[in-house]
Image (spheres, helix red, strand yellow):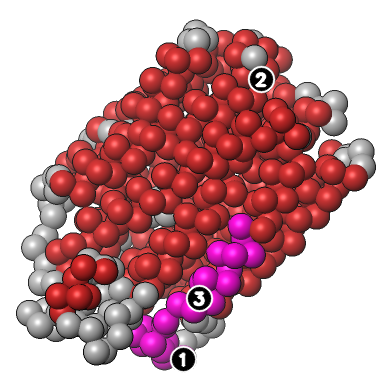
Amino acid sequence: MSQPPTDSPATAARRLPSWAGRNYTLLTGAAVVTNLGSHGALIASAFAVMDAGGSGGDVGLVAAARTLPLVLFLLVGGAIADRLPRHRVMVAANALNCLSQAAFAVLVLTGDPQLWQMMLLTALCGTGTAFFNPAAEGMLLSSVSGEHSNRAFALFRMAMNGAGIGGAALGGALIAAIGPGWVLAVDAAAFAVAGALRAFLDVGHIAERAPGGGLLADLREGWVEFRSRAWLWSIVLQFSVVVAVVGAAESVYGPLVARDRLGGPAPWGVALAFFGVGTIAGAVLMMLWKPRRLLLVGTLCVFPLALPSAGLAVPLPTWGLCAVMFASGAAVEVFGVSWMTTMHQEIPEEKFSRVSAYDWFGSLSLLPLATALAGPAETAFGRTPALWGCAALVIVPTALVLLVPEVRHITRKPVPAKPAAGHAPAPDSSPAAPAGSAGV
């Protein structure tokens, strides 16, 4: 939170870094809470389907039900988040997520859940996420400024993913001990707490939007901003394939391999936790290292995302799977921080949420199809060939995007420091404001 005006600069410095203002602190705390719940809930939903007698195809259908409305409503969510106060959009989305996960928990704990009921409730959760993600990313990008943005984004992601370590490991253990319903209930409570924290975000530093031509005009303006940057649309196209196959491998094939070859949900939860440990290692690296060619370094670090699918295809024992998950987690975090820093540097603040929505929309567009087809692909080709195919579909588009000149040549720009929103300015701060997704 912001320091009281009576604090000396030395006292304030001991409490928070100079770039960590009120909004940044609240956003980070809320992200920690939601990630503690959601990482376990993702595993819980898959095992809830299997405990109800569902097949691998049913697991894929429930996963697709979550991502389909997410894709459908992302662009609308981005336009609304640039028009309305972003924190209100975030709180409303958290409320919907809380209610849908609570209903899912009650359904699992008290009855015999039907496939259509689980699909409906996960679809409501995906709808809330569609409105939340662009608003959250726009709010985060506007909460930091200046030369410390790389460190701020790295610390945010480290805290967020660190919470995922405990969430995944604890979730897997709780599912094995008391069943998936209680893990879903914890996720609902986490959304309630996070929504309460986000209600206190300050949007006073964000200028009010001038009256425009309506929602369609906002979407067109965001599209022009998106398509005018080759580095942006090419990497989003790349991630439309990468996210789809990685999501199918981890949400459908991972739980099935864990059930058949690793001994159940607990080892898979540990493997996912090692991915989280890897993201922390990557974030620590990015707090110390500021690569000059942001997108080149980031894109090279996408190649290791093929390792988990390959590890499941072998399949590796639990310790080997944990090792490849750690490596892929560290690598993707280098990409994530580089990507967010580039977005903060290149995209105007008043267009953050709309551009972020196109980023999320493109990156997730194939995920519902991939998760829905994961079961039929296993039936048609076998689980092992399907997993090797997932690994290949990470490598090929990543190699192709390196052919885009902007991806290879965009460099970090020196930016004068500016006090973060909601934080008292340091004595030597500069008034200059810098111009400003995959994966908040």
Q: Quadrant of residue 61?
A: top right
Give coordinates of residue 126: x percent, y percent. 65, 54
Instruction: State the residue position of label 1.
Output: 211
Looking at the rendering, the stretch of residues picked out in magenta corresponds to 190-211
Q: Residues within 10 Å of mark 1 (few under 14, many from 20)?
A: few
Closer to the chain start, of discs 1 and 3, is: 3
Q: Is residue 60 above or below residue 380?
A: below
The disc placed on residue 87 is 3
Out of 79 and 158, give the one closest to the viewer. Answer: 158
The residue identified by callout 2 is 264
Q: Residues within 10 Å of mark 2 (few under 14, many from 20)?
A: some
Find out whether the residues at labels 2 and 3 contact each other: C-beta distance under 8 Å: no
Q: CA distance from mark 2 to mark 3?
A: 39 Å
Q: Is residue 55 above or below residue 174?
A: above
Amino acid type, label 2: Gly
Find residue 383 and report its horizontal and vertical position in percent. Answer: 62, 13
Between circles 2 and 3, the one closer to the viewer is: 2
The percent coordinates of residue 234 (x first, y second) are 34, 45
Helix, strand or loop at label 3? It is: helix
